[in-house]
Image (cartoon, helix red, strand yellow):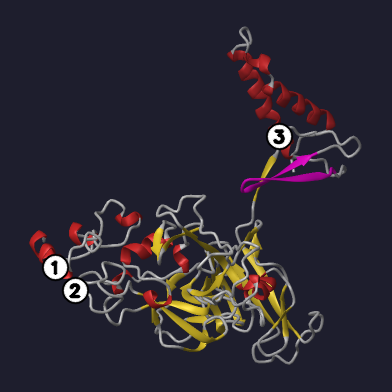
């Protein structure tokens, strides 16, 4: 491409100059600015040769990846010696194209010529930004061209949904009132099956045929689709297996009110309780769907029958019908992974233990809280995605379950004020949220009537 010769000798001279520029003696006293200017002049005059390779000599290139750029080093055919000390930057691709083909067979070898209505292929184009694509008519698109974004959602099969926009990339989100503005992309697949399709595997269609992308939906080693492993469904028969859960939390019982290591409740021959640890398993594919199972560690000498306290296939939902609860209720389902029919929701206090809004926050945060005659603590704080925020439903004034209780759930004397006031906060059970509060008035022998009078005077 240049009109002056750039032969092997010139290339070697440039390599020497480049090495000279990087040598330490260049900066020593006596090697001043004139020499530096001369060196720069030589480099500028012969710089075009750095990017030129003689057409009669095919020099192999080795590509290196660094950050968001690729670099090419030119080496000698015979010796493999580096001829160009400098490397030339090659920008990474900023657009993506792949074609989804439809087939008759599970090996994706015979195209499905019978798909005359939507065609045997569908083009997918993206910019690599925000999981956004422009797609032709076919999967997830009923018009000539659709501008969509892949997102995650629960109870959608694979976990993937396509949100429609007016233009690309993801500009002008269509409102929910628009027909087909948000559709379940692959409702017949599990998340792992859907991910296989995105990575270029031959995958079953909803009508029993098969489909495959010509290349994986990725750009510069980055996936162009979101991770919907938490929202995607598990395989048939997978409910209850370890693969069915996205996360698990252990709840340990302690005899110490601070849940100090070494004070774990022990189950021995003479124990009056049969369990000392439970596990909360968070299901994939359904939001706030859990199993609560016994994971106790018992002494080998323990031979008594174990009380079954497991609660399976239930969902944490918001509600507070009697206004006394912490806002979280337990709803068991009859279908796998919290589907199908369900029983009437139970209060948290009925399924587990009375906790007001402060205690439940401590519980999910992994702090030590009261649980019956003992104390419990989680092995780590819960991810906020794994339980609902039901604060607006929680009891905030008057008597609240988990606060001072005259009798179990019934016959309690209501108090005035809110839980955040010092007097009412002092009536909550010991936890990190109330650690500095005074001892409950009931423990001090104060009668319910006198408690109400004291609260009225102090407030």
Image position, residue 179 (x, y; %): 45, 87
Say left or right for 437 vs 57. Answer: left
Please give the label number shown on residue 413: 2
User: Which segment did they paint magenta?
Assistant: 59-74
Give yes or no for contact between labels 1 and 2 (Cβ–Cβ under 8 Å).
Answer: yes
The label nearer to you, 3 versus 2, is 2
Query: Is 57 part of what is drawn in magenta?
Result: no
Q: Which of marks 3 and 2 is nearer the N terminus?
A: 3
| Disc nearest the viewer among 3 and 1 | 1
State the residue lying farthest toward the left. 457
Residue found farthest to the right: 78
Residue drawn 37% across and 65% down?
360
Identify whether 411 is placed above or below 265: below
Q: Indicate left or right for 74 with 297 as reference.
A: right
Residue 139, quarter of picture: bottom right
Q: Can residue 439 be seen in this view?
A: yes
Of helix, strand and loop, which one carries label 1? helix
Q: What element carries label 3?
A: loop
Which quadrant is the N terminus positioned in?
top right
N-terminal of the pair, mark 1 or mark 2, is 2
- Residue count near mark 3 (Cα–Cα under 10 Å), binned few <14, some 14–19, many ≥20: some
Crowding at dot 2, Cα within 10 Å, few <14 / some 14-19 / many 20+, comes out as: some
Decide if residue 78 is on the left or right side of residue 386.
Answer: right
Residue under numbered circle 1? 452
Which of 76 and 416 lies nearest the eye of the viewer?
416
- Cα distance between the residues tagged 1 and 2: 7 Å
**First reached walking from the N terminus: tag 3 or tag 1:** 3
Looking at the image, which residue is at 64% across and 14% down?
Answer: 35
Magenta-drawn stretch contains 71: yes
In this view, 67 is above or below 396: above
Question: Which residue matches tag 3?
Answer: 86
């Amino acid at each position: 491409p240049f009109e002056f010769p750039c032969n092997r000798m010139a290339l070697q001279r440039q390599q020497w100059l480049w090495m000279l520029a990087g040598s330490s003696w260049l900066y020593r006293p006596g090697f001043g600015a004139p020499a530096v200017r001369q060196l720069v002049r030589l480099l500028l005059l012969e710089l075009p040769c750095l990017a030129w390779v003689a057409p009669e000599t095919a020099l192999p290139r080795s590509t290196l990846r660094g950050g968001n750029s690729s670099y090419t080093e030119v080496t000698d055919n015979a010796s493999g010696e580096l001829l160009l000390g400098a490397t030339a930057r090659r920008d990474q691709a900023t657009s993506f194209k792949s074609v989804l083909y439809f087939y008759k067979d599970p090996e994706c070898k015979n195209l499905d010529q019978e798909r005359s209505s939507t065609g045997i292929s569908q083009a997918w184009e993206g910019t690599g930004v925000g999981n956004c694509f422009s797609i032709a008519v076919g999967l997830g698109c009923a018009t000539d061209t659709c501008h969509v974004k892949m997102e995650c959602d629960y109870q959608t099969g694979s976990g993937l949904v396509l949100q429609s926009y007016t233009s690309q990339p993801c500009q002008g989100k269509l409102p929910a009132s628009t027909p087909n503005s948000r559709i379940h992309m692959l409702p017949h697949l599990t998340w792992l099956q859907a991910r296989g399709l995105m990575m270029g595997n031959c995958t079953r269609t909803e009508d029993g045929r098969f489909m495959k992308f010509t290349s994986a939906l990725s750009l510069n080693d980055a996936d162009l689709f979101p991770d919907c492993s938490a929202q995607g469904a598990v395989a048939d028969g997978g409910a209850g297996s370890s693969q069915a859960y996205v996360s698990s939390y252990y709840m340990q019982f302690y005899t110490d009110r601070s849940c100090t290591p070494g004070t774990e409740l022990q189950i021995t021959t003479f124990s009056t309780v049969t369990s000392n640890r439970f596990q909360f398993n968070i299901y994939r594919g359904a939001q706030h769907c859990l199993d609560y199972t016994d994971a106790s560690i018992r002494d080998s000498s323990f031979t008594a029958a174990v009380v079954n306290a497991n609660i399976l296939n239930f969902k944490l939902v918001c509600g507070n019908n009697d206004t006394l609860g912490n806002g979280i209720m337990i709803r068991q389902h009859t279908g796998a992974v919290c589907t199908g029919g369900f029983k009437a929701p139970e209060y948290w206090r009925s399924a587990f233990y009375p906790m007001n809004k402060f205690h439940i926050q401590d519980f999910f945060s992994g702090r030590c809280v009261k649980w019956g005659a003992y104390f419990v603590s989680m092995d780590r704080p819960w991810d906020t995605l794994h339980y609902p925020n039901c604060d607006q439903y929680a009891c905030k004034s008057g008597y609240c379950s988990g606060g001072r209780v005259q009798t179990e759930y019934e016959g309690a004397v209501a108090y005035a004020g809110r839980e955040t006031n010092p007097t009412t906060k002092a009536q909550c059970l010991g936890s990190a949220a109330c650690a500095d509060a005074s001892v409950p008035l009931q423990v001090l022998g104060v009668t319910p009537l006198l408690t109400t009078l004291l609260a009225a005077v102090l407030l």
